[in-house]
Image: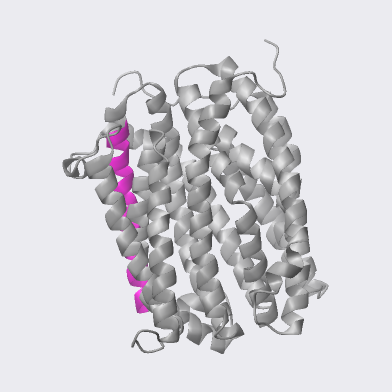
Amino acid sequence: MKRHLFVRDRYFYRMLVTLAIPIALQNFVTFAVNFADNLMVGRLGEYVISGVYMGNQLQTFLQFFVTGVESGMLILAAQYWGKKDTESIRKLVNTAFRFCVGVCTLFSVIVAVIPEQMISIFTNDPHVIIEGAKYVQIVCWSYIFFGITQMMISAMRSVEQSKVGLYVSLIALVTNITLNYILIFGKLGFPALGIRGAAIATLCSRILETGFALCYVLLIDQKLKLKVKDFFRALDVALARDLFKYGTPVLLGQVVWAINMLSQAAIIGRMGVEATSAVSISGMLNNLLFMVVLGFSAALGILTGKTVGAGEYEKMKSYAVTAQVLFAIVAVFTGAVILLLKNTFVGFYEITDQTVAVAKQFIIVTAIVSVGRGYQGTCLAGLVKAGGDVGFVFKMDTIFVFLVVLPSALIALYVFHAPAWVVYACLQSDQILKCFVAIVKINSFNWMRNLTRANT
């Protein structure tokens, strides 16, 4: 079958855009919440910026776990959606929900009991540890609500209902920015709580978004039709086994990536407050530009799962070729825009000249590696992993993280005493190197695997 660079199937483009726009907007709104948080806290000084950044690494660690669980569920659920088997999807949601919320609750308790020790994993600066502990002692209770919300959003995405995530994020945006302004700076008669005010604002916004997500899923949605009783029904052993079997490589991949990110935070945290603030700033700009790319990647994953679940393999091959071309073009464009916005974006922050210089260096590195991330990261997730080859990305990430990324960064830092931007480049090097592996893997088309059961 002849395949074109741009598939001649209007359904592909229509569904990709229909699913991607709400997800991209949700990502953008989530970014706006984090950016506003970062910008307002930035008015309190570099130690506070660093404290919040290090505190958020705990959220990042948990987010990797939650993403692993929901991704494993979504891969299976999207394929069952291709068969229109909503009963199996409800059973999968029930299993994943219990597991995810249980771990989030445990993690919240641990962080609440030993906040200083948790922050000290990433930095040895006593001022940053003090500020970070103030933040996580409060914000840790939001982890439970975060887990619930993400599972509900993922359940809706599996049946092509991607708008609920956008609605949830809009609620978080309005609530978080409003409460940040009131509680951080002491407005409308409230005391100025500083970094603690930012934590309280985040907690309140998480509670509200969880309430809305549950109301939408249980009362409004007409596709999956989840009910409260579905969360208390007995587990389907066969589907639970499938979720464990196919979800474990995804979850382990997230664990590897979490170790990578935590290790990176620890390495950067030992290069001084300038490097810590700089990576926070460059990361915010990178996230801003990748909202659309990540939205389309998530949409592609849903479309891939549905197409493979329906057994339409030749159609999926055509979709895969076009997706690669689209993401490669967008990745190059994104890197160019990051470079163009470098000076303007750094100018938003009240930081020292030394931190400004380091931040600009980090942004240049980010622009270069974003080209690789935009192609291989999004295509491997949206095609290979969503298509059923759940173990490949885990194996590849494990090899690159432990044999390339972390060793090279540690050698650069402690052996060669390299500048901060060189160490940062080592930490991001896999984003380029993995492109060569991705090209071969994706175009072999051996990743399309139907994971559904004939009878459930």
Q: Is residue 6 left or right of residue 219?
A: right
Residue 277 vertical placement versus 20 (above, below): below
Residue 265 percent location from the top left of the image: 61, 69
- The magenta stretch is 89-113
Q: Residue at x 67, y 82 (%)?
A: 351
Q: Is residue 383 a member of the stretch shown in magenta?
A: no
Q: Is residue 212 left or right of residue 46?
A: left
Exactly how many numbered labels are in the figure? 0
As drawn, the residue found furthest toward the top would be: 1
Structure colour scheme: one colour
Q: Is residue 53 visible?
A: no
Q: Residue at x 54, y 35 (%)?
A: 17
- Residue 329 placement: quadrant: top right
Q: Residue at x 21, y 44 (%)?
A: 231
Magenta stretch: dominant secondary structure: helix
Q: Along the line of sight, which residue is nearer the eye, 221 or 110?
A: 221
Question: Where the N terminus falls, by quadrant?
Answer: top right
Question: Where the C terminus falls, by quadrant?
Answer: top left
Q: Is residue 106 a member of the stretch shown in magenta?
A: yes
Residue 417 percent location from the top left of the image: 81, 76
Q: Is residue 389 left or right of residue 190?
A: right
Q: Is residue 432 visible?
A: yes
Q: Residue at x 61, y 83 (%)?
A: 46
Residue 409 percent location from the top left of the image: 73, 65
Residue 160 percent location from the top left of the image: 41, 34
- Residue 288 placement: quadrant: bottom right
Q: Along the line of sight, which residue is nearer the eye, 316 or 432?
A: 316
Residue 365 vertical placement versus 303 (above, below): below
Q: Along the line of sight, which residue is nearer the eye, 57 or 202?
A: 202
